Image (cartoon, rainbow, N blue to C red):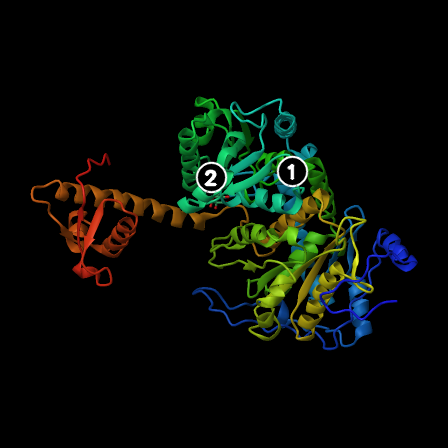
């Protein structure tokens, strides 16, 4: 007999005939039970007031200006759900767009635009220069189906790289290739150094798919934060001797990655280890990194291709090598992506999940990014999906100019962590606060591997709670007119992860065509990098001037104004103050006398006369 149990006490784990039957049923193809439908209709979302850039007319084509046909009762909502539900049987993936309030008329109205986008995507897959500013082809779709590559030399490059990734990973895992001086006699750890697209994909895949006891465990250096780097190295401790260091950079010249490499190489020297015997580079041929790895005779080098962008590189050696080393089935991941790509080539929008997603984004954001995309996977292992999507979506869509040179300031903001955790953080605002978002729920049907589940209350498992939280939040948001999309997968496995990545890659590409922007360049990123370079150059000049003054007898201490004048950069006085404050805080021989809170009072000199070779 079921006892009345407290919320924290568990029921016994005795399997009744009913629970066995339920377990059997749950292994079948899922039968979708509709969530208790919301009672209130979807109202057309209000267009968010936006500043219109000069020279541009206000949002003229807002989909919300069209009359919607909101569902008013549970049965018509159920009909809408059934009508729009997309299912991909091979992938066990479903896409539910019924809680986005578009009308049928919207899809009809957008069809010619979408057909043009699909045709452009077809050209891209055939090798057209789809990134006009950089004059590049865009070929990440070929990575999972090399037969699509526009010529046999590209096809061979892809196949050869995949084979060499698998072969190298097998040799590392089987200890055919060993670190020279590890007591373990084999590699046990991976330290991946890279940033942006050279980190986010591998991080997402590792979090989603690495087994509990992988052949090699992975950790990441994805910043130039010295304390963060120290932490990773300290965590490795003596296992540095059995660490495979994978340095990933498409350009091969990204400063954060270079710095991470230099720091790790120093740690190797300090530990008396030979870095080259444990270093692997993934980069474009003849890049600075490639040349360094070749000259220093690192353990291995793998290519990145010119026609694969960083944010879509997870299915190149960038994502595949770390994944294979963690024992993840990379061919299944590629297969999942290729199945999704096939589905995304369908010209009937209702049968094309990426087109459905792109149109929902267009509807929800007025085609101008007026609403944010909140991504909520209800599964811990998918925690990094939203972070991964942040780069994929925001770096691809966040553009000042459209393809005709008009200023459009496009983009869609992406954020989110995971449910139900976020329900205890910011769902309050989503439900009741500013209405500037739409949600994407990622639902995973399989709670745990078969045979592990148990009922913590009579008839209820821990996973049922997670399910309930998702459905409850979806309903609660909808009943307050907050739109949502739900992507459902059977389980988190290499195939479904490959499919999810491919789904969003294509949706981003299609959406970019709908709003007439280049999704494959990132001109805005350069400004920050250039400014950082200028600041470091200024720091070197400041040091040279202080050095000259401090080597005098007696030592000459300088005000900030004097330093700025001698640098011939009076307009940079604030930056000079910040440089000095930063260096002084780091015991860098700089002595700043006076009150840091009133910068004009500060006088600066070097505590020692250092012959900086600047
Ligand atoms: O792979 P890398 O060349 O080192 O580039 C790393 C990252 O650098 C920049 O920030 C780009 O905007 C990203 O798209 C890129 O992924």
Residue 219 position within the rendered picture, expressed as x and y whole percent measured from the top left: 54, 41
Residue at image x 68%, y 54%? Answer: 355
Residue 141 position within the rendered picture, expressed as x and y whole percent measured from the top left: 65, 40
Figure check: 273 above or below 448: above
Residue 233 has which mark?
A: 2
User: Circle 2: is it few (<14), some (14-19), or many (20+) Cα within 10 Å?
Assistant: many
Query: In terms of depth relative to the viewer, which is nearer, 309 or 38?
Result: 38
Residue 514 position within the rendered picture, expressed as x and y whole percent measured from the top left: 61, 56
Of the two numbered discs 1 and 2 on the same chain, state the one appearing first in sequence. Answer: 1
Element at label 2: helix
Query: In terms of depth relative to the viewer, which is nearer, 487 or 110?
Result: 487
Q: Looking at the figure, which quarter contains the N terminus?
A: bottom right
Q: What is the C-alpha distance between the residues marked 1 and 2? A: 20 Å
CB atoms at circles 1 and 2 under 8 Å apart? no
Choose top left, top right, bottom left or bottom right for residue 60.
bottom right
Residue 579 position within the rendered picture, expressed as x and y whole percent measured from the top left: 27, 51
Q: Which residue is mark 1?
A: 214
Q: Is residue 584 left or right of residue 429?
A: left
Query: In terms of depth relative to the viewer, which is nearer, 241 or 96?
Result: 241
Residue at image x 56%, y 52%? Answer: 387
Residue at image x 53%, y 58%? Answer: 411
Residue at image x 80%, y 68%? Answer: 78
Query: In terms of depth relative to the viewer, which is nearer, 101 or 110?
Result: 101
């Amino acid at each position: 007999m079921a006892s009345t149990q407290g919320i924290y006490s568990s029921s016994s784990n005795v399997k009744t005939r009913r629970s066995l039957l339920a377990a059997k049923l749950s292994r079948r193809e899922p039968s979708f039970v509709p969530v208790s439908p919301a009672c209130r209709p979807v109202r057309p979302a209000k267009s968010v007031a936006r500043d219109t850039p000069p020279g541009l007319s206000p949002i003229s084509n807002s989909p919300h200006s069209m009359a919607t046909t909101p569902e008013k009762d549970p049965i018509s909502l159920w009909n809408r759900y059934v009508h729009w539900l997309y299912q991909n049987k091979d992938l066990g993936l479903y896409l539910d767009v019924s809680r986005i309030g578009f009308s049928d008329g919207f899809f009809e109205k957008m069809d010619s635009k979408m057909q043009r986008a699909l045709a452009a995507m077809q050209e891209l897959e055939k090798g057209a220069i789809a990134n006009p500013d950089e004059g590049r082809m865009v070929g990440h779709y070929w990575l999972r189906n090399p037969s699509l590559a526009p010529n046999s030399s590209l096809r061979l490059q892809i196949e050869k790289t995949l084979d060499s990734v698998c072969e190298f990973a097998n040799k590392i895992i089987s200890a055919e290739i060993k670190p020279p001086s590890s007591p373990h006699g084999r590699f046990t750890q991976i330290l991946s150094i890279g940033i942006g697209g050279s980190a986010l994909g591998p991080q997402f895949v590792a979090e989603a798919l690495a087994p509990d006891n992988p052949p090699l465990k992975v950790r990441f250096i994805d910043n130039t934060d010295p304390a963060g780097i120290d932490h990773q190295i300290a965590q490795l401790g003596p296992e540095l001797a059995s660490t495979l260091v994978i340095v990933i950079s498409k350009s091969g010249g990204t400063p954060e990655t270079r710095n991470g490499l230099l720091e790790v190489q120093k740690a190797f020297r300090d530990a008396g280890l030979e870095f080259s015997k444990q270093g692997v580079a993934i980069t474009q041929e003849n890049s600075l990194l490639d040349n360094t790895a070749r000259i220093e005779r690192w353990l291995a080098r793998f290519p990145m291709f010119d026609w694969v962008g960083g944010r879509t590189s997870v299915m190149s050696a960038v994502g595949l090598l770390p994944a294979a080393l963690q024992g993840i089935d990379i061919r299944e991941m590629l297969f999942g992506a290729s199945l999704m790509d096939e589905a995304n080539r369908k010209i009937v929008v209702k049968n094309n999940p990426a087109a459905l997603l792109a149109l929902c984004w267009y509807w929800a954001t007025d085609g101008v990014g007026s609403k944010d995309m909140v991504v909520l996977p209800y599964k811990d292992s998918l925690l990094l999906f939203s972070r991964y999507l942040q780069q994929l979506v925001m770096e691809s869509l966040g553009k000042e100019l459209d393809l005709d040179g008009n200023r459009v300031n496009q983009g869609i903001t992406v954020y989110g962590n995971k449910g139900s955790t976020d329900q205890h953080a910011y769902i309050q605002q989503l439900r009741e606060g500013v209405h500037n978002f739409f949600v994407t729920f990622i639902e995973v049907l399989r709670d745990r591997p078969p045979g592990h589940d148990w009922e913590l209350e009579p008839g209820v498992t821990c996973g049922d709670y997670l399910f309930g939280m998702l459905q409850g939040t979806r309903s609660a948001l909808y009943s307050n007119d907050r739109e949502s999309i739900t992507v459902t997968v059977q389980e988190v496995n290499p195939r479904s992860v490959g499919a999810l990545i491919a789904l969003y890659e294509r949706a981003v590409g299609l959406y970019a065509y709908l709003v007439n922007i280049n999704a494959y360049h990132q001109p805005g990123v350069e400004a920050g990098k250039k400014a950082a370079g200028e600041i470091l150059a200024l720091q070197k000049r400041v040091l040279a001037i202080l050095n000259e003054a401090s080597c005098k007898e007696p030592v000459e201490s300088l005000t900030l104004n004097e330093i700025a004048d001698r640098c011939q950069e009076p307009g940079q006085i604030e930056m000079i103050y910040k440089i000095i404050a930063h260096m002084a805080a780091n015991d860098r021989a700089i002595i700043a006398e006076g009150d840091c809170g009133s910068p004009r009072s500060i006088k600066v000199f070097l505590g020692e006369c250092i012959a900086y070779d600047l």
